[in-house]
Image (cartoon, rainbow, N blue to C red):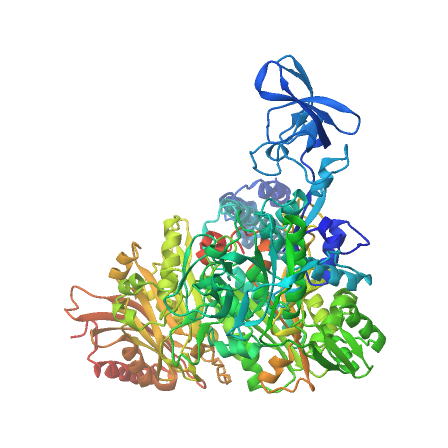
Amino acid sequence: MLVSLRWLSEFIDLPSNDPADLSGVLAMVGHGVEGYEAMEADWKGVVVGRVTAIAPHPDADKIRVCQVDTGQGPEQIICGAWNFDEGAYVPVAKPGAVLPGDFKIGQRTIRGVESNGMICSESELGLGDDQAGIMVLDGEPELGIEFAGLVELPDVVFDLDITPNRPDAMSMVGIARDLAAYYGITYSIPERALVTVPGATNIEVHIDDPVGCRRFVAHEIRNVTVGASPLAVRHRLAKAGVRPISNVVDVTNYVMLELGQPLHAFDAEKIVGNTLRIGRASEGETLVTLDDETRMLTPDDLIIYDADGPTSMAGTMGGLRSEVSATTTSVLMEAASWDPPTIMYMSRRHGLRSEASARFERGVDPNLADLASQRASAMVADLAGGEILEGHVDEIATPTEPVTIELALGEVKRLLGVEFSAEQVARILTSLEMSVAGTDPMSVTVPTFRPDVTRPADLVEEVARIHGYDKFPETLPLGVSGGLTVEQRTERKLHQVMVGLGLSQAVTLPFVGEDDLAALGRHDEVGSLLTVKNPLREEESRLRPTMLPSLLGALRYNISYGAASVALFETGRVYMTSPDPDDERIPHQPARLAWTIYGPFGVTGLRIDGLESDGNLSLAVVRNLIRSLGVEHVAIESGAAPGFHPGRTAAVSIDGSLVGHVGELHPSAGRAYEIPGRVAIAELDLAPLLVPPEDVLMKVPSVFPFVDFDLSFVLPDETTVAQLVAATSDAADDLLEGASVFDEFRGEGIGDGRRAIAIHFRLRSDDRTLSNEEVAPVRQAMIDAAASLGATLRGVA
Amino acid sequence: MTDSSRLDEALAAAPAAVSGAATLAELDAVEKALLGDTSAIGEARRSMGSLDPADRPRVGAQLNTATKEIQGLLASRLSELEAQDEDRRLQDERIDVTLESITLQSGSLHLLQQTMNDIVDIFVSLGYQVATGPEAELAWYNFDALNTPPTHPSRLESDTMYLDFGDPADEVLLRTHTSPVQARWMEANDPPVYIVVPGKTYRLDTVDATHLPVFHQIEGLAVDENITFSDLKGTLAHWAREFFGPKTKVRFRPHFFPFTEPSAELDVSCFACDGGEPTCRVCKGAGWLEMMGCGVVDPNVLEAVGYDPAEVSGFAFGMGVERPAMVRHGINSIRHFVDNDLRFLRQF
């Protein structure tokens, strides 16, 4: 809300007008200042003058010679505008004045006649775009005074962020009230007397919806003359960000800004049947609003009807056919109380959020309607003439009574941490126009303009707010049993392991596109994704069932900017349409660890190319991770998953349960993502990786000599290395200290469907030196065990 | 010339000969010349047999002394030459330390993760536990349990992403803040409660330099007997000083949130200019940075989870993670956080 300091000063005499000070105070009472603008007149040397005589120019038809009195007797000024007569009060730029655009005014001679300055138009002063001629001023301002004063310049306009619980604060009165409470001073509403004439409006109002409309007040003003508002009114509206329209319409906005009650002016003669009825719309009804748009109404819309149907959208926008126009002579000034949610939904549904809807959706005080209608009617009479009929409409469908709250003094200390006396509390609450009876507990009656205050805690907030948040001490309570859980610590360790291996952590958006799933060979899942009902953009409508598209997208992004080597990992959630096992009301949304690695990896340098980012690398990463975290009972077996290379993928199981896959991106997915070359990928459930390992019992390193030997086997492809190592290791029993594969070979001399695997074995006993005689049979047993898998010693027929 | 005088002569010439050997090979030759068969000592040794037996011990002792003396000279020269040799070899092996000829790849933790860890650790050191919860959440926990009525604007479809899941009566959405974890935690645990909740949150937002549909928050909640507004102030002031530095000042301004009463906005003094520097890149002269919303837990929130608001009270706060990270590191667009450009990620 924009608040002009000059206007506000009509309501309260502030101890300081310094905008920085005032910003601080406004913030401290809860009205955050988004910013303020110090407004200065964009001109110098423009004063008020009166045209005392007008004569034709002897040598030009289109300009006239005026005598203008600026307080020191008439001076001659040539003027090309014709929209004024002798006696008009006008702004005069005297010689030496400077107008906007650094336009310097001097004494000139125009076609042989001297001109001592210039009579100014709105546009010449940068005040508006009225091209009709020079500005003719209202009333009889003092001659020679600075014209800037008439439009209240200089001024400061604050942009306030009024919180949604404070309908009352969206007004000059509300801001003045809070400032008065803060400073401990008083404020007042400028006088505007209501003068009525006998007689009553013949318009009747029926409220069919007592929830939608609690109260409807309306005064009728007859014999008005619609025209422009005075300069001062128009400029106050302009500073508040409201466009001046006509005196009657401007009054509705002006009084709304003063009091916080939005108003609507009907052309009373265009209310068909002299009856207004308030109710919900029926399906199919339409209303042409005063912006000339045809609105399709819904049964949730709250509408004001006359005998011909809808004529206004409650609290949102008036109808075109009952609009106040230049020919209106009779005005019905409505001040109503509309249901906040109804206005909130209706204004958004129709894209008609406005100053009025912003107030109604916060909840305008129903007991303000009468004052607002009276004040607006009185102002119409002041500005547009006419008579206000004494008999007016005041329909109360649902009365609104003040609430009374019992406040125990101890509650203030319990919630704020500071002891307040009953006198202190009473003083603060009274300054906010609440009435207080008793001391402890005190009985507090809250005016209806504060619908946000209904409970003791709300009163405590008011005490804190007006006392000043800055005056409370800082105390530091400590928790009782803090710390990270084992799983949380392990997740941090996992992050560090991945970073140590050379991967960078990514954070991606959890959405997925149909194309992504198709690229990974998962088209069949497109129809069974968890979806957003109301997405802003199509690409944010589906939640990912897999992390891979997000990371592949990030990989592609890096490649597009020239990256040759990319290693990313992420821990995040995927989303399923199945229910969460722990809470079936919400979707299953397990956390996953995933990675994508592309280009040379690991150690690089001069003549060192780094590792190829293929399935083997993914396997190395997962093995390292498992060792580092101490994850137990892990099985890594040949596996398959959509989007993964069918021959270069492993299924990872922990405790017999599948936790995910590691391997290499399927080449067709790589083509779809336009990623050239191999990509190491993986996606694993996170939770099983974070299970704390059981306590490890130490194995004493043997001090006895070792025996090393190599065996090279030829084995059929259906036998895995893991099987071969397991069988030979079992045969060596507890003498085996280590077995490491150092070569794999296919080709000549091996035979189709077979490969050679060379293994380096080390035997060592815990308690003795092994003799050759002891080793030989063990070695033979290992060879025999391999033979049982179809593996023969290489070079041995 | 007698043998003995030849020996003396050889002995006298030995130091110069030994020190004149510039290489190990030359030293070998000198050794041969001084101690070999054809040397004065060698010849003297060979002629021992022809000496009068009575002279043999004396001459033998002379010879031994001379030999030891020469051997000593040779040994010390040898170690000199070996040291020189090693020096030369080490010189030859020198590397240009400015050339990074081997790179052991390293990754980086995402800046948001680092920031969350930093913030969480401050509260952990105050005795807080870390809680997490679902991101696809019931509207009940996200709104109702937090005293946000069905007509509150934040529940509008224009602000919140609703999901097509389950029973339409149990509306499911992508949580708009980390606060639903408060409600879940309190439902499952009795007071006292001291928790922080880091995590992802979602809002319908058009992507621009400061908005993303997904962002991160850290929520805090303390519920215990006699937790007060002053406790909230002290706790967040402590956080601000730990996070931004010991000179950081804090300012609490009244605000409104459905789930707290009284509610406040916390501003911290600008860490970059200490306040009031008109051209400051961080605060643009305001001197203060808006950090988070906070307040004393609304009694309705405590009641919704079965706590007695007459018995316990609490405070809650919720801060964004992106914004402090952006102001601290001069990040000009929130999109950098999710572009995952390694040139960005690896700076931190």
Q: Is residue A26 above or below residue A594?
A: above
Residue A682 seen in the current view = yes
User: For this rendering, which residue is in front, B156 or A149?
Assistant: A149
User: For this rendering, which residue is in front, B54 or B142?
Assistant: B142
Could you tell me which quadrant the N terminus of chain A lies in?
bottom right
Task: Determine whether, in the image, residue A558 is placed left or right of residue B288.
Answer: left
Q: Residue at x 59, y 28 (%)?
A: A82
Task: Determine whether, in the image, residue A439 is placed left or right of residue A228.
Answer: right
Residue B131 seen in the current view = no
Q: Residue at x 27, y 84 (%)?
A: A781
Quadrant of res A72: top right
Could you tell me which quadrant the C terminus of chain A lies in?
bottom left
Residue B68, percent from left and from top: 61, 54
User: For this rendering, which residue is in front, A631 or B292?
Assistant: B292
Residue B164, percent from left and from top: 38, 74
Q: Residue at x 77, y 33 (%)?
A: A143
